[in-house]
Image: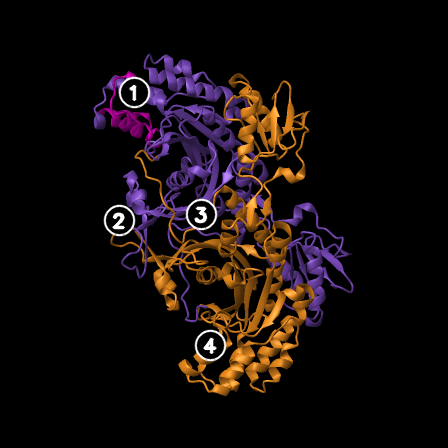
Chain colours: A purple, B orange
């Protein structure tokens, strides 16, 4: 279709693309994610890529990152301006309001789509990337036990990605905004959001720098700042963090509520989660509008990537004036996790094509027999391709080798045999019964590096 | 996250979205499509949603439909203007040029993504829709037999969608641009593209109107116009069309080449395709840049939707000056096929949630036992959700009923039993061994209407 010569195009910075082997890895990861979400009763939705610009721009902080979408030849009377969604939460909120009469609440949904942000591209930041979100949303109210459920789903997903596909293990860090807010208010601090945003930098800049930000930028007293940083330093894989917090001697009813919620979460979830779940009191999700539990997730060995999957509880996903829709959700940064692993060849595919078998063609006159053998194998769910060219034995083998296809079928329809080109073993075979070993049937994800 | 009240949002015309049941249908269809593509040896790729605007706009005819993408606060020095891709062919051509050194040719790829066109929304036309494309691309050359392969893959996909999921059967219509061009040139017509574009309207406006267009708009002589329309009227499910064409008494070497290619395709493919493959000499794909075989596909019973999947052979997908990349491809209009079937409730889902089982909760004190039962069932790949609220027997049943969940698990961890809420049968069960009937395990696609 492109009749004019093109010079070799260059990649666009911030828009990662994979070779087929990388896309195989991504598809396998997304299959595990999707299947696990469904095992936990989350229903799929997909929303359009665009939302009205005025809805996207309402969050303030993020509007500089929005991509505006316009018809090249827009006409008067065209609909309002549109923008590409920058997360899956804003479109989900709109979807819930638009369809609330058709949904049963609590509504459990998952959504796996690309999102776009016009950020300056840098290590680990993309302009186009895939997110996989789960949310549980109630109408009017949503019970606190769903805050426990979300990290269990997340850990189930990551456990399968680790054991089945060789991704790194994770640690899931939990905190509670009520706990933080109550603690800060108990210290007499009023601008709790500003404090949270500074404390959120703890991992990046360290406790001393956070203390300085609090005292210098916000005018928080030294003793209070020290208490905030001491709180941030508390973490535990069980409920012992409660005593550590109490020892700091701060009292506030919101602190009590937050401690109770987080302790209850740790109590219930720890049984299944073991040491992978950490009550980590420096987690704040500074710029997000969470109102209770918050989650962050670190890849073991790649902690400096920052959180690759995060979420939390919000009092109101949306409201239509009559009803509010509180919820709790979690978002997997699929591209953020995979792009570095695939790029550094820590994850790969066992071959670059799905075919387990290449059916060789002796001469163009016998192509129809090769097609028939391929059809017979496919009818038993074996991925096959037919050689594009009648060619000599050695060339057929090399064609398969170049693509990683493990088996070549010779003598289609008259003297059928199949050769494992890795071992060189060749044996007579029938297209009606022969089956490759299970480990060769489909492309496998390989972990290395 | 949306703290200000929103009035109920309205759908955007041309941007279809499904309720979860519709998305289940779409996911199942895409699973069949993807699995079948892989059985035929096509490797997956995914390209970014945007391309440089100057690359998208080169085709001329389509540029009015392009959506331009810009950062809301674009800065001087920002990269070139971008547009959303309007098909998967332009990005694929760019991908092949960009990665040709890393791909093995002939390269067989599939690609399932959304595309965007700023067309005026109307019945069967969307501004955002999903396409599923396969292409086989050679470097320098690509053998003719791949033109036979493509419709066999397409028919394999549609056969499974019909028998497994209840979609309508299809007929796949094939023609050859060389045949048309040779025939027109043999008649002394020079502007063959203009004639093809008029003949392409045959199904919409009928033979008499096409004749009038040819004579009045293009100044084609009456006898020639009659011959063009007579050619367009020829169709056959075997090679008999060759004699019908010959009887029209036109001679041209390009006609001979086209007849031979189409006859060969019908000869080889008919064995597997039966009556679903039609040599149909009115097919022209007027606006596309095909150079040989062309394909269109009609849903039986919904012919007035027009072609829902189409493609063809092109001499040059792309060229980098040194190499050209000829190919043959085919694109399934997934949204075009599914949106009407789902909208008219001709396709639906057996339930609105993936869960086969609801684990009831007697009291909040026993929620942990319910969670343990759910985990045991999930470890054997049974989709489960735990009741959001400790509640009476009847309310738990109604919760399941409203979502179509067939089984409710009672007495988790102390007096386990499972009830089929459709029959009312209830029996003791162990979370380690009980399994629902296979037909209830996953959401099924239901055909009706």
Q: Is residue B239 above or below residue B45?
A: below
Q: Quadrant of residue A233?
A: top left
Q: Which region shows up in magenta? A: A186-215
Of badges 4 and 2, nearer the viewer stands: 4
Q: CA distance from mark 4 to mark 2?
A: 52 Å
State the image coordinates of residue A60 (x, y, percent, origin top left).
Answer: 27, 39
Label 3 marks a residue whose chain is B
Precedes in sequence: disc 3 or disc 2: 3
Which residue is denoted by mark 3 in the rendering?
A: B17
Q: Quadrant of residue B259?
A: bottom right
Which residue is denoted by mark 1 in the rendering?
A: A184
Label 2 marks a residue whose chain is B
State the image coordinates of residue B347 (x, y, percent, origin top left).
Answer: 56, 49
How packed mark 4 is, by other alpha carbons closer than 10 Å (few <14, some 14-19, many 20 or more), is some
Dots 3 and 1 on the same chain: no
Q: Which mark is residue B73?
A: 2
Q: CA distance from mark 1 to mark 2?
A: 36 Å
Q: CA distance from mark 3 to mark 2?
A: 29 Å
How packed mark 1 is, by other alpha carbons closer than 10 Å (few <14, some 14-19, many 20 or more), is many
């Amino acid at each position: 279709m492109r009749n004019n010569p093109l010079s070799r195009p260059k990649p666009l910075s911030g828009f990662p693309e994979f070779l087929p082997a990388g896309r195989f890895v991504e598809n396998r990861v997304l299959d595990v994610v999707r299947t696990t979400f469904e095992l936990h009763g989350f229903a799929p939705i997909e929303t359009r890529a665009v939302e009205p610009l005025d809805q996207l721009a309402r969050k303030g902080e993020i509007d500089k990152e929005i991509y505006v979408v316009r018809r090249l030849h827009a006409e008067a009377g065209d609909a309002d301006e549109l923008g590409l969604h920058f997360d899956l939460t804003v479109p989900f909120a709109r979807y819930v309001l638009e369809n609330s009469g058709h949904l049963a609440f609590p509504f459990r949904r998952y959504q796996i789509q690309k999102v776009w942000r016009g950020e300056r591209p840098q290590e680990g930041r993309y302009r186009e990337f895939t997110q996989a979100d789960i949310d549980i949303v109630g109408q009017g109210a949503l019970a606190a036990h769903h805050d426990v459920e979300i990290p269990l789903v997340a850990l189930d997903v990551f456990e399968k990605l680790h054991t089945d596909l060789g991704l790194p293990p994770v640690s899931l860090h939990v905190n509670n905004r009520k706990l933080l807010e109550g603690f800060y208010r108990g210290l007499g601090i009023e601008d709790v959001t500003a404090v949270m945003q500074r404390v959120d930098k703890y991992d990046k800049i360290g406790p001393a720098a956070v203390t300085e930000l609090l005292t210098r930028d916000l005018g928080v007293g030294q003793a209070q700042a020290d208490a905030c940083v001491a709180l941030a330093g508390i973490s535990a894989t069980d409920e012992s963090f409660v005593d550590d917090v109490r020892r700091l001697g701060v009292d506030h009813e919101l602190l009590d509520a937050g401690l109770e919620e987080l302790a209850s979460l740790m109590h219930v979830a720890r049984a299944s989660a073991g040491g992978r779940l950490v009550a980590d009191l420096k987690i704040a999700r500074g710029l997000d509008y969470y109102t209770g539990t918050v989650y962050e997730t670190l890849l073991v060995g790649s902690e400096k990537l920052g959180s690759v999957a995060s979420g939390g509880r919000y009092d109101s996903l949306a409201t239509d004036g009559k009803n509010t829709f509180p919820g709790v959700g979690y978002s997997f940064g699929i591209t953020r996790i995979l792009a570095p692993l695939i790029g550094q060849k820590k994850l790969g595919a066992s071959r670059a094509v799905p075919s387990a078998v290449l059916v060789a063609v002796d001469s163009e006159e016998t192509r129809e027999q090769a097609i028939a053998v391929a059809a017979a194998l496919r009818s038993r769910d074996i991925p096959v391709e037919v050689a594009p060219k009648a060619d000599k034995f050695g060339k057929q083998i090399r064609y398969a080798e170049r693509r990683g296809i493990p088996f070549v079928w010779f003598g289609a329809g008259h003297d059928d045999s199949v050769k494992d080109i890795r071992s060189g073993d060749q044996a007579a075979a029938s297209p009606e019964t022969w089956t490759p070993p299970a480990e060769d049937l489909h492309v496998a994800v390989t972990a290395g590096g």
